[in-house]
Amino acid sequence: MQTSPVTPEQLNSSIIAVPPLARDAKLKINRKENGKIIRHIEAGGVSSLLYGGNANFYHIAPSEYAEALEVISTECADDTLIVPSVGPTYGVMMDQMTTLRDFDFPTVMVLPMQGLTTDAGVAAGFRKFVEALGKPAVLYIKFEGYLEPETVAELVNDGLVSWIKYAIVREDPAQDDYLSRLIGLVDPRLIVSGIGEQPAITHLTKFQINGFTSGCVCVRPDLSQKMLTAINSGNLDLAENIRGIFRPLEDLRNEINPIRVLHEAVAAAGIGQTGPALPLLSSLEPNDTSRVGECARKLLTWNS
């Protein structure tokens, strides 16, 4: 596992995969199957993995947090970037910080808490966590009103932010006043598009932000990585073509639920047995399972 700090160049060189966390039938963390998923992603040329929402770190038990960190940090290649998550509540993230000190992750992402927050309160909590941990963290902006761009800039300027995952969904990603304000205050090279392949071309070309995260990359990492390379080289026709290949599975994620669909897709494609969904989420209904499985297998076997 990589232990050196994350650089803007690294954010732009590899898709940041956001995989599920595999569990067995009793909901215990499954080392073997998580290893399979990690190695499939690495074999596709992707060297950055972020364990956040798709891994349901929102509901991970404190008693299994150390085990989760040990599994994801040891099942990867020596040069793979692994970023775990903390939170989303303040008390949980501060308790998890003590466990994180036993590992050498270069950074960690703070999950966004929806509701019961204020701009100043989120900033204070993020600041206290980073100062206690002793290294910059990833700031995840997912909701309007969570943090104002000016507040984000203060955290960046104080050296508290490793990079920013920007994931506020817009009907038209090209029309985004918040992101426009943010890139006017923060170096765009520190901002990563956090909503997969679909808005990535617009985010990286119009707003000049630096790379993107993806869940569907877990099924076809080579294609997703090829899309990033195409965007960076200005081959937008190729990038648009690849975006379309991912769209059927992304449409199902948007229709049903992004986390639950990806959890099933990775298993249905034969990449790794992800097991049942960890509550407070639930597994898909049989009809949806069938649709997701068919779509995931088509993506896995797609060949130009």
Image: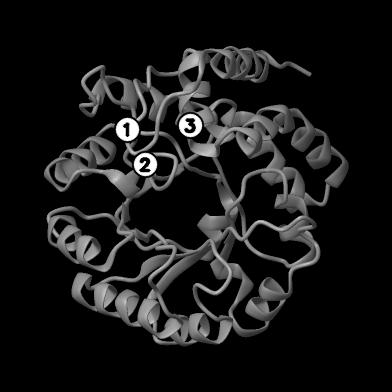
- What residue is drawn where x is 30% and y is 59%? 87
Which percent across, then down, holds residue 193?
Answer: 62, 57
Which structural element holds mark 3? Answer: helix
- The residue nearer to you, when weighing 116 against 23, is 116
- What residue is drawn where x is 29% and y is 45%? 59
Pointers 1 and 2 in contact (C-beta within 8 Å): yes
- What residue is drawn where x is 79% and y is 65%? 206
What separation in Å lies between label 2 and label 3 (alpha carbons)? Answer: 10 Å
Nearer-N-terminus badge (3/1):
3
Per the image, the residue denoted by label 3 is 260
What separation in Å lies between label 3 and label 1 (alpha carbons)? Answer: 10 Å
* Image mark for residue 278: 1
Pointers 2 and 3 in contact (C-beta within 8 Å): no
Q: Is residue 301 above or below residue 129?
A: above
- What residue is drawn where x is 65% and y is 18%? 295
Residue 99's image quarter? bottom left
Which structural element holds mark 1? Answer: loop
Mark 1 or 2, closer to the camera: 1
* Image mark for residue 56: 2
Which percent across, then down, holds residue 47?
Answer: 46, 41
- The residue nearer to you, when weighing 15 against 60, is 60
